Image (spheres, coloured by chain):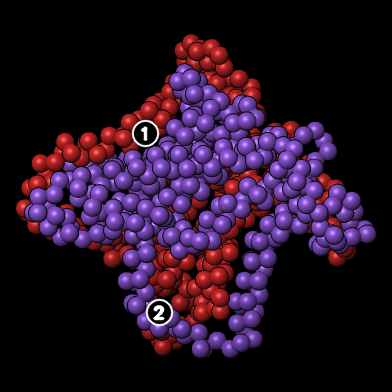
Chain colours: A purple, B red
Amino acid sequence: MSISEQTTVQPLTDDVQGMSYLNRLPRRIVVLYLPLAVFVFVLLFPFYWMAITAVKPNSQLTDYNNYSPFWVVGPTLDHIKYLLFETSYPGWLWNTVVVAVCATVLSLAASVFAAYAIERVRFSGSRPVGLLIFLAYLVPPSILFIPLAVIVFKFGMYDSKLALIFTYPTFLIPFCTWLLMGYFRSIPFELEESALVDGASRWQILIRVILPLAVPGLISAGIFAFTLSWNEFIYALTFIQSSENKTVPVGVLTELVRGDVFEWGSLMAGALFGSLPVVILYSFFVDYYVSSMTGAVKE
Amino acid sequence: MTMTAPAKQSSAFGAIARSNTAVGLFFMLPAAVFLLCFLTYPLGLGVWLGFTDATIGRDGFFIGLENYEALARDSVFWMAVSNTIFYTLIASILKFILGLWLALILNEHLPFKSFFRAIILLPWVVPTVLSALAFWWIYDAQFSIISWSLMKLGWISGPINFLGDPNNARASVIAANVWRGIPFVAISLLAGLQTIPQSLHEAASLDGATGWQRFRFITLPMLTPIIAVVMTFSVLFTFTDFQLIYVLTKGGPVNATHLMATLSFQRGIPGGQLGEGAAIAVAMIPFLLASILFSFFGLQRRKWQQGGQD
């Protein structure tokens, strides 16, 4: 929705330069560049700190008198090696990928049908259903995890990846459906009508006409859903017991944090490597990402 | 924002669409089954569990309002409630002010604008638990980089006990929450700012409006609908926050930073008292409903500002 919207709206905001020619440079430095620099520094510093800690030898990690904490002399890969070869970290990464991909595909499939039905088939009662979908998105996981734990246990899915694959869609389906409804709405009715006149069934219209046109929407919803499942924590913490089934966020927190002596190096390396996949995905799809985030808000 | 209002469709298409209730319900089936099984049913089950004395491994019996009566006498619970409200209030206000400020900055004509927009969203993209771990290390009692820097500058004499002292701990978790929330608010508000036509600002400044007046009487009113939605989301997610507290303090020191969500988890899962945990979770629902209704009715009055019908 928002991608098409932004391209159509932008020309309306006449001159992009606007009135900025009225501002002189010194004023711009104080009013714009300085606060921006502070914002960027504060927002990015934790990542820098994470990265620098991950490659610092243990001797420099807590010795602030002899080494500047902001830099590293002779970076080491020991923490990363430890993480990859002496812990279950690669297994957690794999679990996270499996769970996130399965939950995303499942939610996307269900959402495409639901969004199409609500937005275009317009069965009686489709509007209240659309509203219910939006309300479902507002139900937070932190009030559902206890009853869901009971249900997961009853279904015999406790401590398995299936538990996560089936529970993540509770927040993914409402979100994806809501987003896709917006995309479907922007596809002209005429295309569907002419397909109907040519004798296409609903199913054929959805697969051959609507879906190819909604690819940007599908990408937005897909990568966003993937990120949400990758970042999910409370369900994974509650439903997973054994080390080999844990996801990255849960594994790093519950298995790498031991006793009183924290191995900050490997802990930060774990945090860094757990963040990289979503960051890389994000860097390829920034615009889709922004559009799905603002799209969900704008509707 | 609807591009084609239902009434405007050609009648032929409408007739076919109306006959398709069965098709529509069939298409709804997968999503409906999922949501009924794993969202609606647990929501109901949660309310029911709140009225039982269920523990892990035992179904429990109906005990009426006993859980809630016990909670009403429980000072830790009230501490968690006031913490949650305080946490949500302060963090949301800070996120709004700083996010709006950042959005206004990014809305100016800047070099590398899209690059800045991209990196600013990073805190929001990275898994909360993992960035919270970085904050845990930043807030370390002995080796905090903040303490070290301030000591180098000569502003403080000893390291700050960020997470060990109740008030410091509250401030620290709020700071981490604000850090993570600013990008969402800023980028969403930026999208709203970009839809405000420059010509309005130009017209106002020709009439002699100052920068503040242009912000107060053009930007803010035009932005109000999107502010309402963004802040509703922000408030909901802050109110039900779990991850940050769980990583940084686990509710400590001595339950001083428990939010309702973390208390519910602690009583319900490691503590095994499913009934009591569910009751705490259910106690969050009135607050959530209130904020949703507040924004819903706040929004409706302002729809015309976005060009929609009243």
Q: Which residue is mark 2?
A: B198
Q: How many marks?
A: 2
Q: Secondary structure at mark 1?
A: helix
Same chain, marks 1 and 2?
A: yes
Vertical side of B159 occupied by A288: above or below: below
Vertical side of B56 occupied by B36: above or below: below
Rendered location of residue B277, percent (x, y): 56, 25
Q: Foreground: B209 or A14? A: A14
Residue drawn at x 48%, y 11% is B61
Quadrant into which the C terminus of chain B falls = bottom left
Quadrant into which the N terminus of chain B falls = bottom left
Q: Is residue A181 left or right of residue A70?
A: left
Mark 2 residue type:
Gln
- Given the image, what chain letter belongs to the residue carrying mark 1? B
Rendered location of residue B122, percent (x, y): 58, 58
- Which mark, by number, is residue B35? 1
Vertical side of B272 occupied by A95: above or below: below
Q: Earlier in the sequence, mark 1 or mark 2?
A: 1
- Which mark, by number, is residue B224? none
Q: Foreground: A20 or A86? A: A86
Q: Residues within 10 Å of mark 1 (few under 14, many from 20)?
A: many
